[in-house]
Structures are given as C-alpha cells and as structure tokens.
Amino acid sequence: MSVNLISSTSFNSSLPAGARATAAQAADGDFLASLQSCLADFMSQTMSTLMSSAASGAGAPGASDLAALLGNGSASNGLSASGRNTLLFDPESAYRMMTAINTKDVTYKAELSEMSDMKSYLTTLQQEAANLATIDSATGTAEIEQRLQAFADAYNGWINRFDDDLEAGGLLAGTQAATVSQWELEQSVENFFNGAKDGLHGMGDLGLTIDPVTNLASLDSKRLNAVMASNKTGVISTIDEFSANFAKSAELLNSPGNFIPNRLDNLTRVIDYIDDHKAALQAEFGLGNVARPKGQVAKALASYNAIHASSAGRS
C-alpha cells in the first residue's frame, strides 16, 4: 500500500487489530470506520509478513523496499492483465479485498435507497395517523370507519413494501434502524393503554388489530360499530390518543440523531468515501471482481442509480 493512500485515509496502524475492530464496532454501524479498519488490518498483516520474511533472510528491508513491496507506485506502473497488483507481497489477498469492497459499495447504495424509502413511508404514516386527530363527536360512524381503514391500508402498504427486506436474508435483515422502526410502529398500534381512562384497551377494542403471522393490519367493522354504539366518547378519545402517540413515534424515528437519519448518514459517508477513493483503492489492491447484484439488491441499486443520475443531470 502506498504511503500517500495510508495517510489520506487516516488509518491508525499503531493499534492492534483487535483494538481497531472494537473501535469500529463501538461506532454502532459506522461503516466508514469498519472499512478503514479492514484496510488497516490488511496493511498491518502484510507488513508483519514482510518483516518475518526479512528476518529469515539477509536482514530487515529498508523503508523504500517495504514501500515497493506494498505496492508504492502501482498507480504509475499499472496492473496486470488480470487486474492484480503484482507489486504487492500478496496480490491475491488484496484482489479479494477489493472484490469485497466492490460488493459492499453496491450493497451500501442499495441499502441507502431502501432506508430512504422507509424514511418517506414513515412520514406518510405519520400524516395518516395525524389525520385521525380531526375525528370528533360530530364525525359519523361511517366516516370513522373509512378513516381507520385508510390508516390500516397505509400501514399495510408499509408492511408490504419492507417485510421482505426485513426477513432473514433480506436487504435490511439485522439493520437496527429498520427492525426497530417496524417493531415500534407495531407496538404503537397494539398499545392497550390508549383509551384506558374511558374503559377501553387500545385500538384492538375498536377492531383494529395486527395479524401476528402476516404483520398486516385489519379493521373489524362489526366490532367498531358495536363499541361506537355503546361508548362513542371512549372511541373518539382512544383514537385521539392513538393518533398522537403513533404520529410521535414515527416522527421520533425520523428525527435528527435518531435511528433512520443516523443510518442514512453513516451509509452516505462510506459511499462517498468509496466513490472518492475507488481509483486509488483499485490501484493499490487490484480491480477486484465486479459486483453482480441480484434480487432485492439489484432492484434497490437500480433505484439508487436512477435517483442519483437524475440529480446529477439537474446539477
């Protein structure tokens, strides 16, 4: 690895590999720190191997020898026909690393696209919940049912859009920002404290429930009509409490410094870093295999590329 690239990426090669890994994990999804840690580990391991080889030979190599063996000047000398940097001590490992970076570049962009869509869906759900707050004693049963069904439809649109992403093996599986958002909104719908002061136990008493298997919301009209007939004041109060609590939950998830904005910020930083340093990284480590995404990743990547191509065209 060239001295220039090492300094420009601010690698802390003085830290042991374990300490760097711990620091990266402590960053809570700081992808840029993780990438830099990975690159620094490779440099450290390569240096260690070189020093061990030198110790068994004719003496320790000088700084200029190490720089040459690590690939210093690879940008000017070029790569082999197979895309390897043959000046490296272990060009094959470096090539595999660049392959991994190429893959991460694609998956980070795909995830950014999905998380951006999730942010937009949350805003829509927040607005749908806020619309319920205008229900009052003058609102008829049919209109109340219509509005609750509209909310259920919007909620189901959210579930249908992202449920596959959140399943095991999905693009957002294990992504805390996404899983917490789904869990938080589901808990908000199922919160049985809404309406407690009026003798009701949440939206479930009004017929709005979530299927534990499909995660979809449904509205039982007969149940709603029955409770409307016996306790309309309680129904309106319950809906009002639910509206405020759900809208607040959605707002908080999207608020600066919270789950989704933090994830988007971390993804943006590492994507920008890879874009800015891609040529230099490939000159150091080789071209790597081209990423060939499929399924959800390919679809989300296409969306990302379309949006960014459009943005570039307007600038």
Image: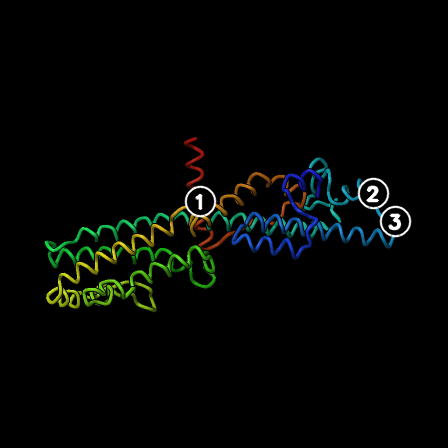
Tag in front: 1 or 3: 3
| Amino acid, disc 1 | Tyr
| Amino acid, disc 3 | Gly
The residue where tag 2 is placed is 62
Q: Find residue 274 and report its horizontal and vertical position in percent.
A: 56, 43
Q: Find residue 209 and report its horizontal and vertical position in percent.
A: 26, 65
Q: Is residue 178 above or below residue 63?
A: below
Return the mark for residue 112: none
Q: Secondary structure at mark 3?
A: loop
- Mark with earlier residue (1, 3): 3
Q: Is residue 295 above or below residue 202?
A: above
Q: Residue at x 69, y 54 (%)?
A: 16
Query: Which scheme is used to colour this image of the protein?
Result: rainbow
Question: Left or right: 40 with respect to 57?
Answer: left
Question: Left or right: 157 with respect to 295?
Answer: left
Where's the N terminus, which quadrant?
Answer: top right
Along the viewing direction, whichever of 80 and 28 lies nearer the viewer: 28
The residue where tag 3 is placed is 59
CA–CA distance between discs 2 and 3? 9 Å
Q: Quadrant of residue 198?
A: bottom left
Return the mark for residue 304: 1
Q: Find residue 270 and report its horizontal and vertical position in percent.
A: 54, 45
Q: Secondary structure at mark 2?
A: loop
Q: Residue at x 63, y 42 (%)?
A: 9
| Amino acid, disc 2 | Gly
- Mark with earlier residue (1, 2): 2
Tag in front: 1 or 2: 2
Along the viewing direction, whichever of 65 and 203 lies nearer the viewer: 203
CA–CA distance between discs 1 and 2? 46 Å
Along the viewing direction, whichever of 233 and 307 lies nearer the viewer: 233
